[in-house]
Amino acid sequence: MKIHASPASPYVRKVRALAVELGVPIEVVLADAAAADSSYGRINPIHRVPALELDNGEVLFDSPVICEYLDATHGGGFFPPPGPERWRVLKLQALGDGIMDAAVPRRGEVLRPQPQQSPSRIAAYERSIRQVLDVLETDVAGLDGVNIGTIAVACALGYLDFRFPDDAWHKSRPTLKAWYDAFARRPSMAQTAPY
Ligand SMILES: N[C@@H](CCC(=O)N[C@@H](CS)C(=O)NCC(=O)O)C(=O)O
C-alpha cells in the first residue's frame, strides 16, 4: 500500500499515525497536489492528499474513508462499533478535522500577497479554530483513550503548533495542552511529525 502525501498535511498525518498504531506498513509517496501542472488528478480527482493506493491499484480518499478502511481491514478498534460511543468518537474526529479545515486554508490565505488577502475570511477561519479549541478545553475528559477522534485532534493541534507557533493556542487552554503533551509522546505521533 502507498499513501500519496505531503510532509506537513495534518490529514496525511492522521492516516499515518493510525497506520503506526495499527502496525500497518505504508509506503509514503510525496505528491505535489497544489502544483498547477500536477498529474496527481489521475490518482485522486479531488486533487488532495492523502490518497491511499491499494496493492490491487484501487485508490481510496479522503482521510476519514482511508482511516476507516485501515481500521476495518487490520484488526482495528479505533472506530467503535455502531452505538453512542461511535458517534462520540466520530464527532471528535470531525472537531479535529474541523480545525484542519480552517487552519489549512487560513495558512493559504495569509501566504497570499497582502492586498489579495481577505480579512473576513481569515477572521472566519480563526473563529472556527478558536471555538473548537474552547470546546475541547471545556471537555478534555472526552479526549480519553486512543481512537480516531483523539488521533485527529492531536494531529490538528500539532499542525497549529507547526504553522502558527505565535498563536500559542495552549496559553489559555492548560488542560488541553497537558493532554496534548502526553498524547504527542506516543510513537505514532513522534514518527509522523510534520516537516
Ligand atoms: N477532506 C480531505 C482534506 C484533504 C486536504 O485538504 N488536503 C490538502 C493538504 S493539507 C491538499 O491536498 N491541498 C491541495 C490543494 O488544495 O491544492 C481529507 O480529509 O483528506
Image (tube, helix red, strand yellow):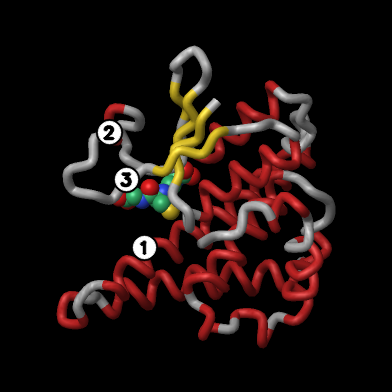
Q: Which residue is mark 1?
A: 105
Q: Can you give x and y, in whole percent of width and height, for residue 28 in the image?
A: 51, 39
For the residue labelled by badge 2, is the local secondary structure a helix, a strand or a loop? helix
Residue type at tag 1: Pro
Does 123 sit left or right of 67 as displayed? left
Q: Is residue 54 above or below residue 39?
A: above
Can you tell me whether the CB of the residue at mark 3 lies under 8 Å from the nearest atom of ligand 1? yes
Q: Is residue 87 above or below residue 71?
A: below
Q: Can you give x and y, in whole percent of width and height, for residue 3 in the image?
A: 50, 35
Residue type at tag 3: Ala
Instruction: Say which of 44 and 127 sits in front.
Output: 44
Query: Residue at left 47%, top 54%?
Result: 7
Query: Residue at left 37%, top 42%?
Result: 31
Mark 1 vs mark 2: in front:
2
- Mark 3 is surrounded, within 10 Å at the Cα level, by few (under 14), some (14 to 19) or many (20 or more) other residues, namely many
Residue 33's disc is 3
For the residue labelled by badge 3, is the local secondary structure a helix, a strand or a loop? loop
Query: Residue at left 42%, top 43%?
Result: 30
Instruction: Say which of 112 and 1 sits in front.
Output: 1
Q: Can you give x and y, in whole percent of width and height, for residue 120 in the image?
A: 30, 77
Residue type at tag 2: Gly
Mark 3 vs mark 1: in front:
3
For the residues labelled 1 and 2, the Cα–Cα distance comes to: 20 Å
How many callouts does the rendering have? 3
Q: Which residue is mark 2?
A: 41
For the residues labelled 3 and 1, the Cα–Cα distance comes to: 14 Å
Does 115 sit left or right of 33 as displayed? left
Instruction: Say which of 20 and 176 sits in front.
Output: 20
